[in-house]
Amino acid sequence: MGRLGDLDFRALPRRIAEAEKPVRWLWWGGTAVVLLLGLALVFRQPLADRLWPEPRAQALRAQAAQALREGKLTAEDGSGARELYEAALAIDPDRNEARLGLSRVAVAAVAQARALGAKNRFAEAHATLKLARELSAPRADILPVERALREREAAHAGLPSLLARANAAAAAGRLIEGDDAALPLYKRVLALQPENKTALEGREDALGTLLQQTRAQLREGNLAEAVAAIALAREYDPGHVDLPDTEARLNEELDNVRRRAGNDLRGGRLERAADAYRMLADAGLKTEAEAGLAQVAKALAQRAEAAASDFRFADANRLLDEARTLSPRLGELAEVERHIDRARQSHARLGSDLSPRERAARVKTLLEAAAAAESRGDLLTPPGDSAFDKLRAARALAPDDPAVKRASARLLPTAKRCFEEELRGNNLARAGGCLDARAIAEGETASLAQARRRLAQRWLAVGDERLGAGEVQAASAALASARRLDPATPGIAEFEGRVKAASAGK
């Protein structure tokens, strides 16, 4: 042992660190072991599968092989040979044993289907053949089993009896209704013997009769029945000789219904237009029908708003309910409902405190004021004191009063003349005022709807001109005017698309 004076104190820290190295390595190694044990306890089998997949995959393959030996080819709970091999393949896709096992399952499925067919267990045999196809068993192995299965099934089912029943049903005109109808019976025969000539000919004749009946239904306007029959015929035999002609007749009739619906909508015949769009819905054209019914609902909402402005609240509520029935999600309906409420409040303020005698006197005063304004030429202005404003107030108080009706009839030609003159002069805003006056005097009629359509089309023409000049804001305002007048105006949707595109490009 050296003396204290011989020690090199400068080297002392390095020697201590060298002495501590084994201790640190032991500490880190022990910590890692504890962590791995903790993870193993937490994750157990899943962690083992990730760290050591081969033992798990090997166990699954062994279970699958055992299930295959037991003839348990597939099972919904995952215990079948197919499911176990697929699980092994998912865990370890690089090894080929699971793929080979699935091939053996496919071969076993073909053999099992053959055995089940021999025992007349036809449903199970078909299900097992389906498994063989899904697992890509050789087609050359599947076809003989399929053929033998159909032959045995046909013999067991009694094909002569099925054919006789099908022919009898066809002769009686029972083609499609029920399992004992002609076409379902022919289908059962052909499922067993696809080349059975008698069944093929019987099916063709039955479908010919069905499609002949369908063309008669189309002539009678029974679109829903015709569409269902055509779909059924296509399901039985998409290549039937009468099918193209019947489908062409269907398309012609659908075009006729579309044309009628559009004409009725434009002409203000809203109930007929709605009926036509419902026919399209019954024919399966749901999206197109809903769009058409929405247009009808918008027109009804306009009428409801006009009726409320004339304080005809029963009519307004009825029209609004009809619109809501046709298109429940139409956005304009909420605003129309608010307009009706405001008109009802205004009407309550006007006449709630008047006795019948006072009401009659008030109506007489308003009509006299309307006549005076008419004589001065104040038909539309000034606001509140024009002839039509006075007439509106009189109608609000007594819409059925004979004097009010006479005044309306007297002012109606003036309102019509006003509209035509302003429209010819392209004074569209004033033409709109004349149209409002006409609505007061005339009420909602088909001729008023046509006038609204004409003014809306003129607004679209102005909008098109403004858009061509690059005045997008003016074009948008013209579009809004046209939509308020008649949202079903032809071309309004296309012009709206152009305005949106131009606005996006600014």
Image (cartoon, rainbow, N blue to C red):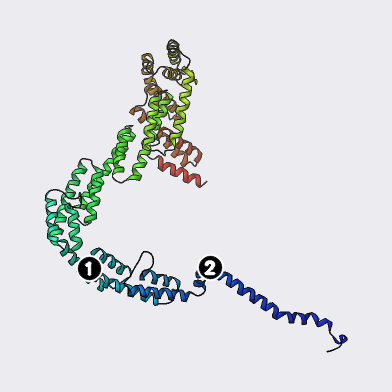
**Residue 471 percent across, percent down from the top left:** 50, 40
Q: Residues within 10 Å of mark 2 (few under 14, many from 20)?
A: few
Up the image or down, 376 lies above or below 430; here it is above
Numbered marks: total: 2
Up the image or down, 344 lies above or below 484; here it is above
Up the image or down, 416 lies above or below 453; here it is above
Residue 489 visible within the image: no
Decide if residue 174 is on the left or right side of residue 254. left
Residue at the image point whose x is 46% and y is 36% from the top:
480
Quadrant in the picture for residue 312: top left
What is the secondary structure assignment of the residue under circle 1? helix
Residue 70 visible within the image: yes
Quadrant in the picture for residue 444: top left
Report the front residue among 447 and 223: 223
Which mark identifies residue 452?
Answer: none
Residue that sits furthest to the bottom in the current view: 1
Q: Residues within 10 Å of mark 1 (few under 14, many from 20)?
A: many
Which residue in the structure is indicated by mark 1? Answer: 117
Decide if residue 163 is on the left or right side of residue 63. left
Q: Which quadrant would the N terminus be assigned to in this image?
A: bottom right
Query: Which is more N-terminal, label 2 or label 1?
Result: 2
Which mark identifies residue 43?
Answer: 2
* Amino acid type shown at disc 1: Gly
Report the front residue among 206 and 485: 206
What is the secondary structure assignment of the residue under circle 2? helix
**Residue 371 percent across, percent down from the top left:** 43, 14
Report the front residue among 257 and 163: 163
Residue that sits furthest to the right in the current view: 5
Quadrant in the picture for residue 427: top left
